[in-house]
Image: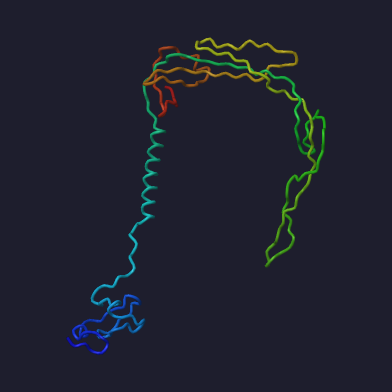
Amino acid sequence: MTVPDGGVPAVEAAGAEWRCRFCGTANAPGAGHCRSCGAERAAAAFPTAEAAPGPVAPARGGRAGVIGAVLLVAAVFGALAAYLGLRQDAEAVTVAGFEWERSVEVQDHETVREESWEGEVPAGARIIARRREVHHTERQQVGTRQGEPVYRERPVYGKKIAYDLERWLVVRTLKASGKDKSPRWPDIRLNLGEREGKRSESYVVVLQGRSLYRMKVPREQWLGMREGQIGNAVVQKGGAVLELR
């Protein structure tokens, strides 16, 4: 086999161009070295007829696609859970019992320490101390910049007043409860200086359906119901009765 100048066999010299794997330059078939970087053909040659390796394209929908799919699945399950949690079922129920509770607050005079701005102190208060304090801030124009107004915050001071005041406070709550149709108020026994405060009451009807339910109802409705009465209840998933018909 004859070898022309450049050290490339004659058979190879008559072949196709080759491309340098180091710098990507195309070289003549008979070149023994890369004309750009000088690398020897034996170590650097890629025949141009074969595809030289290029950058590997990232897979479509890679990490972002996986994250998107996970978020989509989470959204679907979240919507399904919300639907199941809010789904309402109507079912036949029977009145199985009644419950009631009544309470009365008992109040007494107590001395409390409070603070207010000057001019807002309630009548009858005993002034303990005064101090100067920032009441609020105001925007004040201090000039212009490039034709636009420039502002700064300016503190506005006022007098903060500390004072003692006698107020009626809840010292205890009296309660009575039962599971019958005869609600009553608790016995009220007041100590010297005390007074009766707020009264409150609640009424519950017990319903037997697929499960045992309890539902608060107005006093008039509660008094008009009777044990064994049959009706329909709209029950939320979880057992909360939303409506009784």
| Residue at the far left in the pictured view | 1
Q: List x then y, in percent, for residue 235.
A: 41, 26
* Colour approach in the figure: rainbow
Q: Residue at x 75, y 13 (%)?
A: 192
- Drawn side of residue 131 relative to residue 17, left or right: right
Which residue appears at 72% of the width and 54% of the height?
153
| Residue sitting nearer the eye, 219 or 197 | 197
In the rendering, at what x and y percent does residue 232 appear? 39, 21
**220, above or below 143, in the image:** above
Q: Residue 161 lies in what quarter of the image?
A: top right
At which x and y percent is residue 82?
A: 41, 37
Location of the N terminus (image quadrant): bottom left
Q: 100 or 224, which is in the foreground?
A: 100
- Front in this rendered view, residue 12 or 155: 12
In the rendered image, residue 211, in percent from the top left (x then y), is placed at 39, 21
- Say left or right for 131 vs 64: right
Q: Left or right of 93: which side holds 47? A: left
Quadrant of the rendering where the C terminus is positioned: top left
Quadrant of the rendered image containing residue 62? bottom left
Please name the residue shown 25% across and 77% down the image: 47
The image shows a total of numbered marks equal to: 0
Kindly identify the residue that appears in the image at 40 percent across and 12 percent down. 228
Residue 27 falls in which quadrant of the image? bottom left
